[in-house]
Amino acid sequence: MNIFKNIFPEKKLSHPLSLSSLFADMHSHFIPGIDDGARTLDDSIELIRGMNGMGFGKIITTPHIQGDFFTNTPEIILNGLAHVRAGVKKAGIPVEIDAAAEYLLDDRFEEKLKSNNLLTFGDKYILAELSFFSPNPNLYNLIFNLQIEGYKVILAHVERYSYWFNDFKKYEELKDRGVFFQVNTISLGGYYSAMVKKMAEKFIDLDMVDFLGSDMHNENYLHALENARTEKYLEKVLASGKLLNSKL
């Protein structure tokens, strides 16, 4: 039974949308065994095969880099990338695979910035996330320092930071500071909660979404992405002409 259809029946399309107009997905976790994403190469291959079947021609996978928990390095990620690329080639999946990282803006991030060894993609984009409990009190300074060094900051899954749900001005301030916003496509299907879904829709209504990302971790996310393909708000954002995924 499709529980999402029962919860949100009024906003479903009759046929799933192709995601080929996005072309590139820029938020996923496909390097096996280094974060909370794919556990094995076989897992990665099956998830990538599923995404290619939905229309993606390029995947930029972004393992977590965090101060204390996922202590990955560019070397670990790029070695893992070579492993995944070889698996994809062997499987005959017609998709380009690249890698960057999803950086937590925690109290250890500044030392990573000073190292001048950050993983980026496209036109020096860097994918950053915040704690789900509270934002870094030094957030604006971190963003400013990144921008001074020429990085273009993308805030991951902007719709999921519940501490700003009743303080939307914080999002507007970040936009005014030149931060790009990424929404998880699966949020549109209600994967996290009804409130997160509403926030994702609000960003679309306000033309504040620059990138869509799958945030793919496992098979549950793949099913959720399939479910989101019948959302009218997905149709709306794909038709907006605002998304930058295809330029990566």
Image: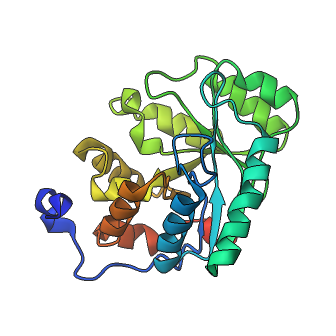
Percent position of residue 130, x then y: 54, 31
> Percent from the top left, x then y, of residue 30?
59, 55
Q: Residue at x 40, y 39 (%)?
A: 160
The x, y position of residue 210, in whole percent, is 56, 58
Q: Nearer the viewer, residue 224 or 174?
A: 224
The quarter of the rendered structure image containing the N terminus is bottom left
Residue drawn at x 51%, y 59% is: 43
Which residue shows up at 48% across the image and 45% down it? Answer: 157
Q: Quadrant of the C terminus?
A: bottom right
- Asked which quadrant contains residue 176, the reply is top right
Instruction: Count how many numbered circles sit on residues in the image.
Output: 0
Residue 242 falls left or right of residue 203: right
Residue 125 visible in the picture? yes
**Color scheme of the displayed model:** rainbow
- In the rendered view, tell whether residue 229 sits above or below residue 141: below
Residue 206 at least partly seen: no
- Left or right of 191? Residue 28 is right
Instruction: Give the camera-side residue of 48 and 185.
Output: 48
Q: Position of residue 161 (x, y in %)?
A: 42, 34
Q: Is residue 137 above or below residue 202?
A: above
- Residue nearest the observer in this picture, 62 or 172: 62
Would you say 105 lies left or right of 207 here? right
